[in-house]
Image: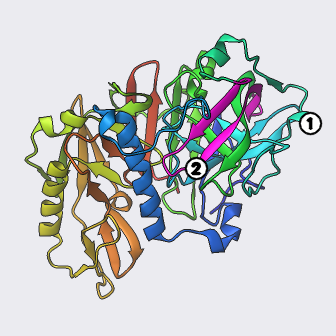
Amino acid sequence: MCIYDGWLSISAFDKKSSLTVVHKHGPCSQLHQDKANIPTHAQILLHDEARVKFIHSKLAKNPGSSNVEETDAARLPAKDGSVVGSVNYIVAVGLGTPKQYLSLIYDTGSDITWTQCQPCARSCYKQQDPIFSPSLSSSYSNISFTSTVCNSLNSTIACVYGIKYGDTSFSVGFFAKETLILTSTDVFDSFLFGCGQNNQGLFEGPAGLLGLGRDKFSLPSQTALKYKKFFSYCLPSFASSTGFLTFGNGGLSKSIKFTTLSTISQGSTFYGIDITGINVGGQKLSISASVFTTGGAVIDSGTVITRLPPTAYAALRSAFRKQMSQYPMAQPLSILDTCYDLSKCSSVIVPKLSFFFSGGVEVPIDTKGILYVNSISQVCLAFTGNSDDTDVTIFGNTQQKTLEVVYDGAGGRIGFATKDCT
């Protein structure tokens, strides 16, 4: 059920400062009308792999070992470690005076918020909303090349930002300030954002990106005086349902369990978490704690499939296959190697699965987060392994479905509560 009116209009839900979240290609999104461009599950997983490789390259303890291309700083001066790949969730915000509505991908793995801007001096991809026009806004202004803000972008000509993503998509344009409208009562003057004049890649449909990372140009950092770097979201459980993105700590569930945020030394953008164990079917897997601490871990709203250290994934896969042995296996789906043909089953018993985080926090994973369904004859375990135990673990968005995930940046903690978003 789509409960917003119009194209991703802002909704208050039962909380203050909330935006409606929809799946990019679900029927609640107008992008769904362009059915020819809806990716297959295999394509989604391929894009997901590109995102993960880029995250690993940014967070590698030995960056020199990565073969992922870095963009020349003179050409794209503001590299914020961002990645797009398979990001699938979008919200609507207002920008400018008078406000122009924009549908933006939201991403905890990115910092700079940007949108395509007229006159699209070099290139603009096809988007559903009208492209933002600075000339129609009385509150728009470019950032001065001599300002300290511009100096931090390492810009060499004018105050230009540039971001190249892991899938070779990119956005380049003027760094500017403008009035940002999240809700009718949540309006921020002089919000810093990228006004894109050359934008190419896998963005087609949304107007740009809303950066929810931890660095200084992210939305949580720029609105810290009001929201204290506090926000939460609940992803749509199905492509046909909606979720929410809420700013501020009003109306939080008492059932939220908090664990400590950690910092990944190579990546100031990402939200680090400390995974300590996994439980399958009521049994905690025999995995040494050092397996998770070797590469560290982050939670990411844009990665689809959780990536585990290969040692941990092998233990999870073995336990899961043992408890699913009564069901016939199917061919692997891209990166997912444990799949089942359930076409002849009238009912299926899926083993319960939960993750343990620092502080003794146990978070149950819903069945929607355990299984990735390509078809009834190809239902797969929604986890995969990294190449090496030293690669960072990524807690992806499939496993976050039905959970309210709470980010308390100022308090240095992250929380989880079971909450069906449908």
**Quadrant of res 300:** top left
Residue at the image point whose x is 15% and y is 40% from the top = 291
> How many discs mark residues in the rendered view?
2
Callout 2: SS: loop
Rendered location of residue 146, percent (x, y) = 72, 12
Amino acid marked by disc 1:
Leu
Q: Which residue: 69% across, 25% down?
A: 192
Residue 380's quadrant in the figure? bottom left
Between residue 291 and residue 277, name the one nearer to us. 291
Query: Which part of the image, by quadrant, shows the N terminus?
Result: bottom right
The answer for how far apart the CA atoms under marks 2 and 1 are is 28 Å
**For mark 2, what is the residue?**
169
- As drawn, 410 above or below 2: above
Residue under the image location 78 percent in, 55 percent down = 6
Q: Earlier in the sequence, mark 2 or mark 1?
A: 1
Whether residue 384 appears in magenta in the rendering, the answer is no
**Residue contact at pointers 2 and 1, CB within 8 angstroms:** no
Question: Which label sits in the foreground, 2 or 1?
Answer: 2
Q: Residues within 10 Å of mark 1 (few under 14, many from 20)?
A: few
Which region is colored magenta? 157-185
User: Closest to the observer: 59 or 73?
Assistant: 73
Q: What amino acid does circle 2 point to?
A: Ser
Residue where numbered disc 1 is placed: 136
Q: Is residue 254 left or right of residue 390?
A: right
- Magenta-drawn stretch, dominant element (helix, strand or loop): strand
Residue at screen point 77% across, 33% down: 184
